[in-house]
Image (cartoon, helix red, strand yellow):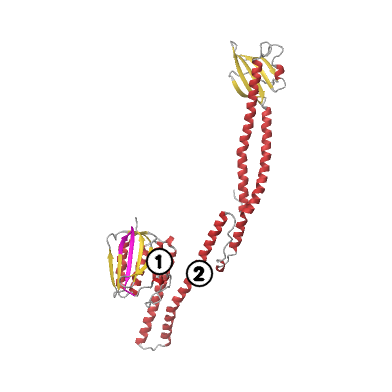
Amino acid sequence: MKLPGSLRARLTLAALLAVAIGGLIAGPLLLAAVERDGRQAIDRELREQTDQVLRGPPGQGRFGRGPRGGEPLLRGSGTFVQVAYGDEVVARQGDVPDAAPVPPGREGYSTVDIDGTPWRSLTVLLGGPTDARFQALSTLAPVQERVASTRRLIVLIGLLALALTGLAAWFFSSLAVRPLARLQAGAARVTGAEDLSTPLPDEGPDEVRSLAAALNAMLARLQASTAATRRFAADAGHELRTPLTGLRANLDALARNPDLPEHERATLLRESTAEQDRIVHLLEGLQALARGEAADALPREDVELGDLVDAAVYGARRRHPGVAYELREHDGAGGTVHGWANGLRLVVDNLLENAALHGGGRVDVDLAREDGGWLLRVADDGPGIPAEERERVLEPFARGRETTAQGTGLGLAIVAQQVGLHGGELRLADSELGGLAVEVRLPARA
């Protein structure tokens, strides 16, 4: 069964189904109660009639004796009585049907069918050597008529209740979904990035207000993300334009001056190679940031952090032979971190690269266990970063105002991103060497 697409129609259908299910449950229970009450009333009447017939004064009230027997008592009441000895009925009085059965040999109440009509029966064993039995029977036709009349009334009331419920549900659901319609109209007006700052209407029931608040929060995040994307694109374009412009100028100079002296030509080629390296590093940084945004799709595994730091320091020494890297692994530094191995390597590589580019020639690297987690600390002897600028330099393309060393401005941004993806903390502090100390805390593998 395919549900209707309209919420109002679904609410109305749900109300109708609820009323219908209630009627289907309550109707049979009510009919059963009416039938039970009618049968119990007949049972009481049968008992009273049996007592009057069998327990009256001798010669007056007993069945078949005297001028005041049971016949006037039973005639026209839809009831008859009979007495049987063994398999033979010896007396019958009242509204006796043509196919009246022989009284059963078991005492008590029962329901018998006579010519397709149910009768209620009460049998009393009289005893004696002839196995005498007395039976009083009353038709259940009035009870059936009452049940049928009640059934028709239930059906009529049920149909009327369904109609009224449908109208009421349609009306009230229309009022209920009206705030949703206003919310939908407000969302439809958001057609571009310039509309993200317009809040959606926050009114109506609690659920609608909660939905509107969630949508407004989503719009705010989209607005911030859009602004960050635009700023990122502008910064990336600006950073790429500078080396591309220098590279183009060098190539133009080589093309216009084929007779340049060899040393000048070599200088232009070295500068072009440096600009190309800068572009490659910038693109690699952008790629790393993009991968970090797809954190859910990145493979995660147990990474031996001590081995990773050792390999990163070894690589940094080869890239920067003039920098003195000192690695100090403290007690308890053996263990694993669950995460993306390449991302963790990016953290260490970028910290070591920044320390080499902006330091004075010495970098201290400490790895230790602290408060159940890892502490990686990279300190240099450079000029450092003022405290008021440390938050800003964690953004992409942001660099210290006094920085003169070459770089893309993406190193610390990549570090901050990867540390966040691994559930860690990043802190910039002053170094004992006089420069900057970067502390990374990562949760240890249990």
Rendering quarter of residue 416? bottom left
User: Most prominent secondary structure in the magenta stretch?
Assistant: strand
What residue sits right under mark 1 in the picture? Answer: 416
Question: Is the residue 261 above or below the residue 370 in the image?
Answer: below
Of 84 and 172, nearer the camera is 172
Residue 378 picture location, percent across and down: 33, 68
State the SS at label 2.
Answer: helix
Residue type at mark 1 is Ala
Name which of mark 2 and mark 1 comes first in the sequence.
2
Q: Which residues are magenta?
A: 367-382
What residue sits right under mark 2 in the picture? Answer: 227
Question: Is the residue 403 above or below the residue 16 in the image?
Answer: below
Rendering quarter of residue 298? bottom left
Rendering quarter of residue 394? bottom left
Q: Which mark is residue 395?
A: none
User: Dot 2, how many residues are within 10 Å of its Cα: few (below 14), some (14-19), or many (20+)?
Assistant: few
State the SS at label 1.
Answer: helix
Describe residue 381's horizontal placement relative to residue 418 as left or right. Answer: left
Residue 368 picture location, percent across and down: 30, 62
Q: Quadrant of the C terminus?
A: bottom left
Residue 13 part of the magenta segment: no
Pointer 2 with pointer 1, Cβ within 8 A: no
Instruction: Say whether residue 101 is visible.
Output: no
Residue 380 picture location, percent across and down: 32, 72
Residue 281 picture location, percent across and down: 39, 73
| Residues at marks 2 and 1, CA–CA distance in whole angstroms | 20 Å
What residue appears at the point 36 percent right and 86 percent down from the top-left corner?
A: 264
User: Dot 1, how many residues are within 10 Å of its Cα: few (below 14), some (14-19), or many (20+)?
Assistant: many
Residue type at mark 2 is Ala
